[in-house]
């Protein structure tokens, strides 16, 4: 298949086409400087290391301390002794080190498969994050379509950076980051498979994508975005084409074919085969998969009060609101879907296999900047062909699959509890003035909120970037530590003086920073253990006991799935919880406020997004008071 790059076809040791990433004159905040071109080559990035075995085992035991019982810990210590001294650990470690020598990244393919492509849960709600952008106030439909046209032009302008390899390299802690993810987000799509999905990427080869997909009233259209000379259509032209799409999709009784993509992956894979039996359907699906990205022109959603507005939009981004509303106005397999509602709703949802949040947010920042600057020049009105409407033949089998998908989506959307907190009391500036890391501070507030609600602490996952390494994705910072536990216990103890609480907060923040530094330098625990486990599956007849242990199951049950995704634009990223009785918490600390999106499942009686949101707000305020007290005491 020419022009098709199948991610899962990559085998360990296969070399991906490397790209020269050149600097541009406009440097984003995270870039500290421009560096000579040769230093930017992806090939210069270090390989992800395999951490020393004993170090990971010791850190694993320390990580367990605040979250398992004494007996469980003792049992795990014995198993760990056996693992380390009985030869199994060394054997697996050596095999892993050999894999690391032979491949460009020992983890990336395993991670792609185990975290995404093998996962059978629906991508909607369970893995695809959403981004909520500030509300737009469109005067009329023209206003909405013009806004959509500008946004499309902005994304295509960003695409030039990809096509010309002129994307500025990002830095973290002074080190250049792997830029590969940026090259995976446009013109790509996930394809359901019976056991494992794949991701196709239409950017290399003879026929790169030149169209986007627009969906309105559940009807899909191919919109060619370049003219015969290869120039991007102007905003005026795109706007006119959108108008044509709008006018030819006014019927609202269409089958919501896109809702099929929100199903459990095994179910969708079977439905996909049913759908593609028909030649017209196959061509239509291929056109969506091949498109550069999708734009969803959504119908208005039920009105809510201003303070619930962002929560409602976050839900719309994550699932579309259910079968009655906009869930069928999506193709959830598509890596990037921008959502622009008639009612001013604005944001996106993205399929996670291709990339983490930071590249997506960088793209958003770029597009927002573009939209603010672009001068609309009236272009001569050259008649453009009507965008192609994609046809679907709905056989009885497909109709049944759609009905099942609608039911499933209605259950998922009703089950998701979302709350977006726009915490307005302070932000990064205040924390910088108090010489405190924003990330660690917010993490400790989440710890305190959880402890106050449940009187215990729980396994907590904070995403850490591994992009300092070639093809690096993520590892885990464990925010629950012995020090965080001491801090939250002290906060709930009225007998403790503030001076002690401040000292414990500082210690907990310090531990968090150390764990963060270890994680981003490739020395975290989770992925190393995963590597040893997967190596064990390949190599051994029986699984080492440490992976069958209660503590391991407890440690992997992340009641708190958290991540910082910072941006220049005032947006909030959101994602679903990892476990049925957990929370998803994504935060964006801006200079003077913090956007925090919290999710939970309604089917779990113990969790409640709005209550947790209030608890986080209280925790942040109480912790601010501590920092202010400390400063007063110093004066
Ligand atoms: N005194 C003063 N300033 C301090 C400080 C202190 N003691 N400690 C930290 N800071 C400052 C730093 O200098 C830096 O300043 P800047 O904002 O001017 O750049 C800032 O605080 C650091 O910000 P912070 O938010 O605390 O942490 P971070 O930028 O190191 O981010 C992670 C930490 C874990 C979020 C980041 O390393 C990471 O991995 N991000 C990727 C997340 C991801 O991929 N998510 C995917 C979700 S799909």
Image (spheres, rainbow, N blue to C red):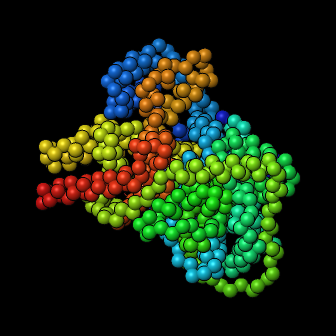
Residue 504 visible (yes or no): no
- Residue 159 image offset from top left, x and y in percent: 65, 64
- Residue 283 image offset from top left, x and y in percent: 83, 56
Out of 221 and 174, give the one closest to the viewer.
Answer: 221
Answer with left or right where residue 492 lies relative to residue 203: left
- In the rendered image, the vertical position of residue 90 relative to residue 230, given as above or below: above
- In the rendered image, the vertical position of residue 366 relative to residue 446, given as above or below: below
- Residue 552 image offset from top left, x and y in percent: 45, 28
Out of 81 and 348, give the one closest to the viewer.
Answer: 348
- In the rendered image, the vertical position of residue 436 relative to residue 264, given as above or below: below
Q: For the C terminus, give its image quadrant.
A: bottom left
Residue shown at the point (47%, 55%) measured from the top left: 418
What number of labels is visible? 0
- Residue 88 image offset from top left, x and y in percent: 51, 17
Residue 432 visible (yes or no): yes
Out of 634 and 564, give the one closest to the viewer.
Answer: 564
- Report which quarter residue 554 is drawn in: top left
Residue shown at the point (42%, 52%) measured from the top left: 609
Residue shown at the point (84%, 47%) measured from the top left: 277
Answer with left or right where residue 485 lies relative to residue 380: left
Residue shown at the point (49%, 22%) measured from the top left: 548
Q: Residue furthest right?
A: 279
């Amino acid at each position: 298949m020419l022009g098709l790059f199948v991610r899962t076809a990559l085998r360990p040791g296969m070399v991906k086409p490397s790209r020269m990433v050149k600097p541009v004159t406009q440097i984003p905040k995270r870039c500290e400087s421009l560096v000579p071109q040769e230093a930017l080559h992806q090939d210069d990035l270090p390989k992800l290391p395999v951490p020393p075995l004993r170090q990971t085992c010791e850190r694993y035991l320390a990580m367990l301390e605040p979250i398992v019982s004494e007996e469980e810990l003792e049992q795990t210590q014995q198993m760990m002794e056996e693992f380390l001294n009985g030869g199994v650990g060394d054997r697996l470690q050596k095999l892993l080190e050999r894999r690391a020598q032979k491949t460009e990244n020992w983890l990336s393919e395993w991670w792609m498969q185990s975290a995404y492509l093998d996962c059978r849960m629906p991508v909607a709600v369970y893995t695809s994050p959403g981004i909520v952008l500030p509300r737009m106030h469109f005067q009329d439909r023209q206003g909405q379509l013009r806004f959509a046209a500008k946004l499309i032009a902005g994304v295509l302008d960003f695409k030039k950076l990809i096509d010309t390899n002129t994307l500025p390299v990002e830095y973290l802690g002074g080190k250049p980051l792997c830029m590969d993810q940026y090259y995976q987000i446009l013109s790509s799509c996930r394809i359901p498979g019976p056991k494992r999905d794949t991701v196709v990427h239409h950017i290399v080869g003879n026929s790169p994508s030149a169209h986007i997909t627009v969906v309105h009233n559940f009807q899909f259209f191919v919109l060619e975005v370049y003219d015969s000379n290869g120039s991007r259509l102007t905003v005026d032209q795109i706007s006119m084409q959108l108008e044509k799409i709008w006018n030819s999709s006014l019927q609202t009784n269409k089958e919501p074919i896109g809702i099929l993509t929100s199903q459990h992956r095994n179910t969708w894979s079977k439905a996909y085969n049913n759908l593609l039996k028909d030649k017209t359907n196959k061509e239509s699906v291929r056109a969506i998969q091949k498109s550069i990205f999708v734009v969803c022109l959504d119908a208005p959603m039920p009105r809510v009060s201003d303070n619930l507005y962002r929560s409602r939009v976050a839900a719309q981004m994550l699932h579309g609101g259910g079968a009655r509303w906009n869930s069928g106005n999506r193709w959830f397999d598509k890596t990037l879907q921008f959502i622009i509602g008639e009612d001013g709703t604005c944001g996106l949802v993205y399929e996670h296999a291709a990339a983490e949040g930071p590249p997506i947010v960088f793209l958003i920042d770029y597009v927002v900047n573009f939209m603010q600057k672009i001068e609309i020049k009236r272009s001569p009105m050259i008649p453009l062909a009507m965008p192609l409407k994609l046809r679907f033949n709905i056989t009885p089998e497909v109709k049944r699959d759609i009905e099942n998908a609608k039911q499933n989506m209605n259950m998922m959307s009703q089950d998701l509890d979302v709350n977006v907190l726009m915490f307005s009391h302070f932000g990064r500036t205040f924390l910088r003035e108090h010489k405190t890391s924003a990330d660690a501070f917010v993490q400790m507030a989440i710890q305190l909120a959880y402890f106050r609600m449940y009187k215990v602490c729980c396994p907590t996952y904070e995403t850490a970037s591994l992009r300092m390494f070639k093809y690096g994705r993520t590892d885990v910072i464990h925010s629950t530590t012995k020090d965080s536990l001491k801090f939250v216990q002290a906060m709930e103890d009225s007998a403790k003086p503030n001076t002690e609480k401040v000292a414990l907060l500082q210690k907990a923040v310090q531990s968090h920073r150390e764990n963060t530094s270890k994680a981003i330098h490739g020395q975290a625990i989770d992925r190393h253990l995963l590597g040893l486990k997967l190596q064990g599956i390949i190599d051994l007849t029986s699984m080492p006991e440490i992976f069958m242990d209660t503590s391991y199951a407890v440690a992997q049950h992340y009641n708190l799935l958290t991540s910082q995704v910072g941006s220049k634009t005032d947006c909030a990223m959101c994602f679903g919880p990892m476990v049925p009785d957990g929370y998803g918490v994504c935060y964006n600390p801006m200079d003077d406020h913090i956007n925090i999106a919290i999710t939970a499942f309604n089917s779990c009686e113990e969790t409640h997004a709005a209550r947790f949101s209030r608890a986080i707000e209280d925790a942040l305020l109480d912790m601010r008071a501590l920092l202010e007290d400390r400063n007063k005491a110093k004066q």
